[in-house]
Image: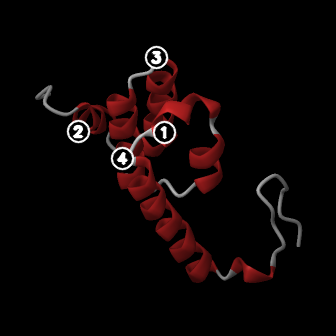
């Protein structure tokens, strides 16, 4: 491990599955108010397929991240990934909201 970039080091240690570890690490770093490291962890999760806008927008432990200047760029990338998955899997007919489970 190089120590130069926490996200790369974590990714090297765990390989796949970084989305879950990245999210958990981002929450831990958000709790400790280490915004730069929390952003690195979110970017790690994004490299491994994070597309959960609701989590990104509403996780209380990420309040500090949402106040930073990098947040809008991160959010735009996650929003694009979410839109691509929606287009690929064609679940447009399912009514959803940010708080409800989709029921067909």
- Choose the circle earlier in sequence order: 2 or 3: 2
Q: Tag 3, which secondary structure?
A: loop
- Choose the circle earlier in sequence order: 1 or 2: 2
User: In the picture provided, is 99 more to the left or to the right than 89?
Assistant: right
Q: Residues within 10 Å of mark 2 (few under 14, many from 20)?
A: some
Residue with the mark numbered 4 = 43
- Quick check: marks 4 and 3 in contact, CB under 8 Å? no
- Rendered position, 90 above or below 19: below
Real-space CA distance between mark 3 and mark 1, rounded to the nearest whole angstrom = 15 Å
User: In the picture provided, is 67 more to the left or to the right than 59?
Assistant: left
Quadrant showing the N terminus: top left
Numbered tag placed on residue 67 in the rendering: 1
Real-space CA distance between mark 2 and mark 4, rounded to the nearest whole angstrom = 10 Å
Tag in front: 3 or 1:
1
Numbered tag placed on residue 32 in the rendering: 3
Real-space CA distance between mark 1 and mark 2, rounded to the nearest whole angstrom = 24 Å
Residue furthest top in the image: 32
Q: Tag 4, which secondary structure?
A: helix
**Residue 59 visible somewhere in the drawing:** yes
- Choose the circle earlier in sequence order: 4 or 3: 3
The x, y position of residue 56, in whole percent, is 56, 47
Residue with the mark numbered 2 = 8
Colour option used? secondary structure
**To which quarter of the image does residue 2 belong?**
top left
- Rendered position, 45 above or below 96: above
Real-space CA distance between mark 2 and mark 3, rounded to the nearest whole angstrom = 20 Å
Residue furthest right in the image: 103
Real-space CA distance between mark 4 and mark 1, rounded to the nearest whole angstrom = 16 Å
The x, y position of residue 5, in whole percent, is 19, 34
Q: Residues within 10 Å of mark 3 (few under 14, many from 20)?
A: few
- Choose the circle earlier in sequence order: 2 or 4: 2
């Amino acid at each position: 491990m190089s120590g130069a970039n926490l996200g790369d080091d974590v990714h090297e240690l765990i390989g796949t599955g970084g989305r879950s570890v990245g999210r958990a690490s981002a929450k831990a770093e958000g709790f400790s108010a280490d915004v730069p490291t929390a952003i690195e962890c979110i970017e790690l999760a994004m490299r491994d397929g994070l597309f959960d806008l609701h989590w990104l927008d509403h996780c209380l432990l990420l309040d500090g991240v949402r106040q930073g200047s990098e947040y809008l760029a991160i959010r735009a990338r996650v929003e694009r990934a979410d839109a691509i998955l929606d287009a690929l899997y064609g679940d447009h007919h399912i009514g959803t909201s940010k708080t409800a489970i989709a029921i067909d």
